[in-house]
Amino acid sequence: MKRVGNIVVVVLAALAFAGPVWAQGSGAAMPEQQGLREGAQEAAEALVAERVDGQKSTAGRGSSQEEEEDPSGFRVFWADGVRMETNDGKFQVRLGGRIQYDWDWFGDDSEVDPFVPGPIEDGTEFRRAQIFVSGYMYEKIEFKAQWDIARNVVKDLYFGYRHPHFGVRFGHTKEPFGLEELTSDKYITFIERALPTIFDSSRNSGFLVHGNWDQFGYGVGIFRDTDSSGVGQNEPTIADTDIGRLSGYNFTGRVYGLPVKSDDGRRLLHVAFALRRGPREPSIPTRFRQRPETHLAPYFISTGKLALQSSTIASIEGAFVYDSFSLQGEYKPAWMTTEDGINPSYLGWYLYGSYWITGEHRAYRNGVFRRVTVKSPFLEGGPGGWEVGLRYSMLDLGSDAKPEDSAIPGDRLDDITVGVNWHWNKMTRMMFNVIHATIDQEATIWTFSWRGQVEF
């Protein structure tokens, strides 16, 4: 059919242009001959235009005839990452990753010396260097495998059933708990998440059911605490991790809603509630401990090791976006039941505001914040996207259940963080944070942090 179409176009074009040549050689054309030539030329131009329009509409995917002939053929293209997709759209594979490179400079640590063992040294690290492959098969079966090279740990590793209102995941994935935690570290406003996210379990292995509508969504699941390789079993090394992970099972659920949403998401109000409860193994010590909001700092406060029988942690979320201005906060109380009957309770909360000087706004979808598209990218001659933020966060781990021989005596940590983000484009940004941390409302220390980040 393609060959026939080409022949028709060539023949009609030849007739159209042969007329003027013939007329020059034999004198003026007769009226009917002139009309024939004009009609042939119009037909040829119409066919050419039709073919050009068809090529434009199927650019990158092949013509509709090609798709019908070979629906399993695929194209490779860039859409915020490398993607491969079949012509019929039923199969897709995405390749990508991120690099986050950090530097930290600490002020005089003499005041915090009684609380922090050893000196606090300036330093640098690759905070994250991750690669992943994700996609779907037969439109409905999703999968993702993500590995952090810098930490040599498993991140996402799951498969599941895709459905907008009733999706299911099996494997190692994020528990549905906490707005700050569920928002990817690629898109959070500050270099590190707020202090109370110590209560967020982040990723664990289990079963998750989730769904989203335009202004409502939910997630609920059963999870098993795991180590950095995704293995979960009753071993002391699991409960003794750096982020204070609990030992046992978690029954976790979250619901969110948007009472206000207008102007394509430039103005919205997000509210959510999440609950995480689970039995614990008292013979495996559990410990919560936290740094100030920089990863290269040592731990400033700790609960010490606890023999827990159960834990219940709640999260109340709120976020407000009005054009370039936004507010976000979470309130997280935690209740523990111990083997010795002390039953401590802990509390953390944070609140921050941010403003885009260059006119962008925070992007939101399905209960979390997403990538922001910069209006005038720096690498294309513009100023890039500039965002400023101010955050206060507090975490009180109490002292009513802390062992007397705990290596870290601090109980409460308060942080004030000022942040400036320079987005070169939507895939690259430079982040600058100044952090003022206070231990037990007595000792303080300043930190300056810088991060360079790129996605691919």
Image (tube, grey):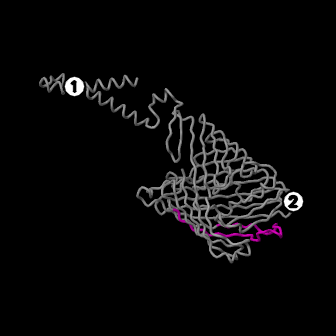
Which region of the structure is painted magenta? 393-421
Q: Which one is in front in this view, the residue at disc 2 or the one at disc 1?
A: 1
Residue nearer the viewer, 371 or 432 = 432
Left or right of 91, for residue 273 = right
Q: Quadrant of residue 212?
A: top right
Other-residue count near label 2 (Cα within 10 Å), few / some / many at <14 / 14–19 / ≥20: some
* Circle 2: residue type: Glu
Q: Which mark is residue 72?
A: none
* Circle 1: residue type: Ala
Instruction: Name which residue lies at 38% across and 24% down.
Output: 3
Q: x%, y% of residue 233?
A: 80, 49
Reading the chain from its start, which is encountered first: label 2 or label 1? 1
Instruction: Name which residue lies at 77% across and 58% down.
Output: 240
Q: Quadrant of the N terminus?
A: top left
Instruction: Name which residue lies at 48% across and 63% down.
Output: 357
Which residue is label 1 attached to?
Answer: 18
Vertical placement of residue 160 versus 175, above or below? above
Which residue is label 2 attached to?
Answer: 339
